Image (cartoon, rainbow, N blue to C red):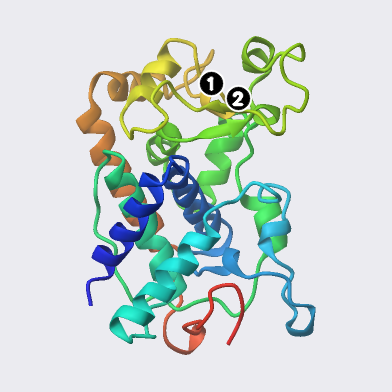
Amino acid sequence: MNLTGIVNRVLRSELSNGNQRMGASLLRLFFHDCFPQGCDASVLLVDDSARGIDSEQNADPNKGSLRGFGVIDTIKKTIVSETNCSSVSCADILAVAAKESVVILGGPSWTVKLGRRDSLQAFKAKANSDLPKPSFSLQQLKDAFGNKNFTPSEMVALSGGHAIGSVACTFADDTVRQVRCTTSTVLDPNSTRVPLDKTPAIFDNQYYVDLVDGNGVLNSDRVLVGPGSDRAGQVQTYKTSRDSFFKDFAKAMAKMSEMGVLTGSQGQIRRVCSKLN
């Protein structure tokens, strides 16, 4: 079975139907799955009080903002219907979908090892405590990523995930909100979005160009080049060298994809990604 081929085909169909944000949404979904506890598809589980599941989807950083669950379900169903194979975990699908989303939108590829099992529980408290916030300072970012064994350099590379997609105005930096989300034209800033860089449908290094030019959208973007930042040189390198960014991003994503992976009896292969077997 060609898992990558199936994932790629489903994603291209989704994107061709006008849902250009979906690639960014799946990359974010993968990050929000991996960062709290590991790449175990725990973020896909919905509330199930009978089985002790308090969904991570209700954590503050995730509530009402994560997307792509239906696409993951479609990939799962396509695998079963076309190959009669039920041994592909939802965690593996998430990992491959994140990589293929980046590739389809023009970004780099990386090797995704397979064999993950799906979590038997959710980790809402860890999602609340461990996921970086858009308001974070540079030191808070370093601490959050450092707690997951990522270096400051890897942190800057992974921040390049903001090369695609958009964010609700309510999360944008104060300056961005004042200029691009004014109350005179926006009644509900939660329903209005700002592109994270000037080419939100293309995975390129424009994000770093925008940072150097003072056009970062989130505070956690702007601090990478703000006063006293020791990361500004790396941002400048990525601004001038897309290849350097792509190489470092791919390496850091491969590392992230192996965080806290479950194998064997540590987990299960869910028949339906949103609930335990």
The circle on residue 139 is none
Residue 117 visible in the current orientation: yes
Q: Residues within 10 Å of mark 1 (few under 14, many from 20)?
A: many
The circle on residue 222 is 1
Tell me, yes or no, whether the two marked residues, 2 and 1, touch with CB atoms within 8 Å.
yes
The location of residue 119, given as percent across then percent down, is 55, 76
* Amino acid type of the residue that numbered disc 2 sits on in the rendered structure: Asn
The location of residue 67, given as percent across then percent down, is 56, 52
Nearest the viewer among 191 and 112 is 191
Q: Secondary structure at mark 2?
A: helix
Q: Residues within 10 Å of mark 2 (few under 14, many from 20)?
A: many
Residue 260 visible in the current orientation: no
Q: Secondary structure at mark 1?
A: helix
- Would you place residue 30 above or below residue 213 in this image? below
The location of residue 21, given as percent across then percent down, is 47, 41
Residue at 35% across, 60% down: 10
Q: Quadrant of the N terminus?
A: bottom left
Q: Quadrant of the C terminus?
A: bottom right
Residue at 35% across, 49% down: 101
- Give left or right: position of 85 versus 71: left
* Amino acid type of the residue that numbered disc 1 sits on in the rendered structure: Arg
Nearest the viewer among 227 and 197 is 197
Residue at 71% across, 51% down: 63
Tell me the residue that label 2 is attached to. 219
3D distance between C-alphas at marks 2 and 1:
5 Å
Q: Quadrant of residue 259?
A: bottom left
The location of residue 214, given as percent across then percent down, is 49, 11
